[in-house]
Amino acid sequence: MLGELEQEGAAVICDLEAGVGSLLRMSDGHVDVTLAIVEPTVKSIEAATRAAAIASGHGKVIVVANRVRDDSDTELIRSAFPDHDMHVIPYDAAIRRADREGTAPIDFGDSSAGLAAIAQLAHRISRSDPVEAA
Amino acid sequence: MRIAVVGKGGAGKSVVAGTMARLLARGGDKVLALDSDPIPGLAISLGLGPLDTPMLLDAVEKDDNGRWRLKKGIGAARAVQRYSLVGPDGVRLLQFGKTTASGLKDFMGSVNGFYQVVHRLARDDSLSGWTIVGDLPAGPRQTAFDWVPYADKLVLVVEPTWQSILTARRIARISRQRSGVEVVAFGNKLREDGDTDLIEERLGERLGGSLPFDPLVAEADAHGKALIDHAPDSPAVHAIEHLIDAISRRKVSA
C-alpha cells in the first residue's frame, strides 16, 4: 500500500510495529527514508542495528536516538552506529505525560525539548529531497 | 507453574520474565525460560548477554510435503534437554533464534520446531515438575496465534500510558478466550500517585502487583546486564519477588 500512496505534495508517515517484521516485508521504493528509533539500552540497540541493516536496502536510514538523558547515552548509541546519520531526541517528561493522558505530544505543551527535537527532525527530512537532507 | 509474559513493546516484559526465571530457580524450581521474540531481550535479562543462536535447527527435518517437523524421537523433554542452554542459576533457555538482515528465513526450521515444542510442553509428563517462563514479542499477535498453549498464567506487563493499556486490554481479551488461563496484570514504571488507579480504571481490572519506576532497571538495561545481577537488592527485584508470591501463592520474597 505504501508504494501506491505517493503523490505530489503529500507526505506519508508509517508507524511500524515493534521489531522488524513489517520492515522485512517492504520492497524497494516504498519509502524514501526510514527512521530507526533507538533508546540507550543494549536491547534497543540490538533491535535497531537489525532494523537499520534491513532498511538500508530500501533507501536512506536515519538513526533517531530517543529518550537520551546525557552525553553518555548519545555516545552509547553513536558508537553502535558510527556510519549512520543520527538525530537526538532528549528524554522529555512532557512526552511521557502526554502518553499518560492519551494526548498527542504536540497538543500537550509548547515548551517541550523533545517536541522541538522532533520538529527539527521533520524539518530536516522535509526541507528538500530526503536523501540530500539527511 | 507455566507463565507467559506479555505486553506492549518497551513495557518491561523481558526484565520481568528474566528476573522471575532467575528468582524461581534460586528458590529451587527447575526453570525453563522460553524466548519466542525474534528481537533480542530475554537472554540479556537472564544474564547471558546478546545471543542469536537458532537452537532447534538440528532438532528438525522436512517431511515429504516440505513441512518442518521435529525429528523422530525428539519430543518436548528431549528438545529441552538436548538443545536448551543452561544459564545463571541453572535456568535453561530455549529460543528459536533472532532476526538478521535476511529475516528469519535461514532458520525457519528452528522457528517451526519451537512452535511444535511449545505445543507439547504441557502434555509431556517428564516436564510436569518444571516451571516455565515464556517471554513473548510485543503486542497481541503471538497470543492470538496460539504460541503459548502451555501457559496457565499470563503476566500482562502494563505501563501507565494509553498505548500500553490498550494493548494490554486486547491481549487480556484474547487470552481469556482460552479456558484455564489466569491473567495477572502487573503495573510497571509507575511514577506518580494515581498511576495504579489510571491503569486499573482503563484496563478494567485490578493489578496483581506493581513496580515503581526504578532507575536501576534503566541502568541494568543500558549496560546489557540482568537486573538481578546488576541490582539484586533493588526495589524492582523485590517487586518481582512479590509478583511471584502473588501468582504462585507461595513465598519467595524475604
Image: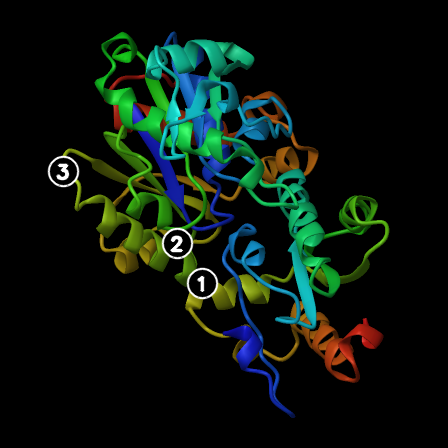
Q: Which residue is drawn at 59% across and 83% down?
A: A6
- Chain bearing tag 2 is B
Q: Which residue is drawn at 54% across and 80% down?
A: A4
- Residue, far front: B64
Compute the Cα span from label 1 to label 2. Answer: 9 Å
Q: Mark 3 points at which residue?
A: B179
Q: Is residue B186 visible?
A: yes
Q: Which of A76 and B253 is in front in this view?
A: A76
Q: Name the residue under label 2.
A: B195
Q: Name the residue under label 1.
A: A100
- Chain bearing tag 1 is A
**Amino acid type of the residue that numbered disc 1 sits on in the rendered structure:** Arg
Q: Can residue B254 be seen in this view?
A: no
Do circles 1 and 3 both sit on a common chain? no
Label 2: element kind = helix
Label 3: element kind = loop
Q: Which of B77 and B251 is in front in this view?
A: B77
Q: Residue at x 64, y 26 (%)?
A: B49
Q: Specify whether B31 is left or right of A58.
A: left
Q: Do the residues labelled 1 and 2 touch (CB within 8 Å)?
A: yes
Q: Nearer the viewer, residue A28 or B241?
A: A28
Tell me which corner region of the image, top left, top right, bottom left or bottom right, holds residue B46: top right
Do circles 3 and 2 both sit on a common chain? yes
Q: How crowded is mark 2: few (under 14 residues within 10 Å), some or many (20 or more)?
A: some
Tell me which corner region of the image, top left, top right, bottom left or bottom right, holds residue B78: top left
Q: Nearer the viewer, residue A77 or B211?
A: A77
Q: Position of residue B73 (x, y in %)?
A: 34, 10
**Amino acid type of the residue that numbered disc 3 sits on in the rendered structure:** Ser
Do circles 1 and 2 both sit on a common chain? no
- Chain bearing tag 3 is B
Please say if B34 is above or below A25.
Answer: above
Q: Position of residue B251 (x, y in %)?
A: 31, 17
